[in-house]
Image (cartoon, rainbow, N blue to C red):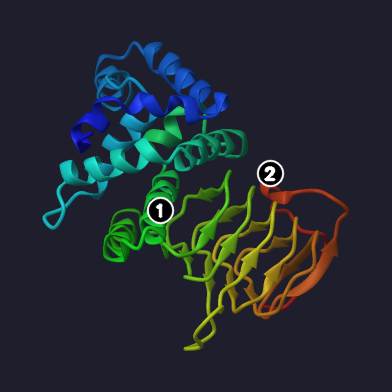
Amino acid sequence: MTVQDRRASLYDCAEHLKAETLQVWQTMRQQAQSCRDPLSRQLLEATILQHENLPSALCTLLGHKLGNSAISAQNLMDVFADIYHNYAAPLNAAAEDLQAIFERDAACPDLITPFMFFKGFHAMQTYRLAHWLWLKEKRYLALHLQSRGSEVFGVDIHPAARMGCRILLDHATGIVIGETCVVENDVSLLQGVTLGGTGKNMGDRHPKVRRGVLIGAGAKVLGNIVIGEGAKIGAGSIVLESVHAYTTVVGNPARRVGVRNTAMPALTMDQTLPPIDYII
């Protein structure tokens, strides 16, 4: 089957998709069909309504955003279609990311909005495609997508990093995630967050961010350290040591200012802190 055939028959992969993924697409189409403004309707037709399924719409959206003189939008769409045809995991993850954004972001009224306009969502899906290419030893193409994602969305995620599902990159501008990072499910990162190394050390050198962590705007988490499940990192913090689960840290260098029981701050997006007196 040619790449063009795969693009024409993308719905063949539906049997490998979760029911929730198919429901997300149906909800998006219903939301788009309810629009009555003529100019907005034209935009929705091109982005959503003319497509039969989520992979087709996502291929087109990302292809047009990432294409350039080196690799055209059409060629990228063919590459993405080939991936989605054979590999349902990034599609299921994309649907889960959309749902997570809708549930957590107060500025998100529906599923259409992040799909069409939120560069954090676009950057995550670019990473998911680049990661697949990296694992398939197509390293230069993966790095090309990383580079284009950084140029277009202002988000730099190394394709070798391991990212879970239901990830929210809120506003997203300036987020950097290094090569050996691990970010588990249900994590929320705000703009300007760095998950980086501490120098020129080789090997495993980047943070491991466990489930449910919330990292505030501008925070820098550096080194091969662990941010425990349900931890909260205050905005602007510099974190150089591991953080225990369900613990809040703030400051430069970051220090503990509170401990909770089981709350997942990434899900509530609660960035408030206990009464503290700390020095940055």
Residue 112 relative to residue 151: left or right: right
Residue 154 relative to residue 198: left or right: left
Query: Is 242 in front, or is 275?
Result: 242
Residue 23 relative to residue 38: left or right: right
Q: Secondary structure at mark 1?
A: helix
- Residue beneath disc 2: 267
Q: Quadrant of residue 195?
A: bottom right
Residue 87 in the image, given as x and y percentages of width and height:
42, 41
Q: Quadrant of residue 106?
A: top right
> Going by the picture, which residue comes out furthest to the front?
1
| Circle number at residue 132 | 1
Does residue 174 sit above or below 200 in this rendering? above
Instruction: Determine if residue 186 is in view.
Output: yes
Q: How crowded is the residue under tag 1: few (<14 C-alpha within 10 Å), some, or many (20+)?
A: some
Q: Quadrant of residue 116?
A: top left
Does residue 144 sit above or below 85 in this rendering? below
Does residue 140 sit above or below 172 in this rendering? below
Residue 230 in the image, given as x and y percentages of width and height:
75, 55
Does residue 104 sit above or below 214 in this rendering? above
> Going by the picture, which residue comes out furthest to the left?
69
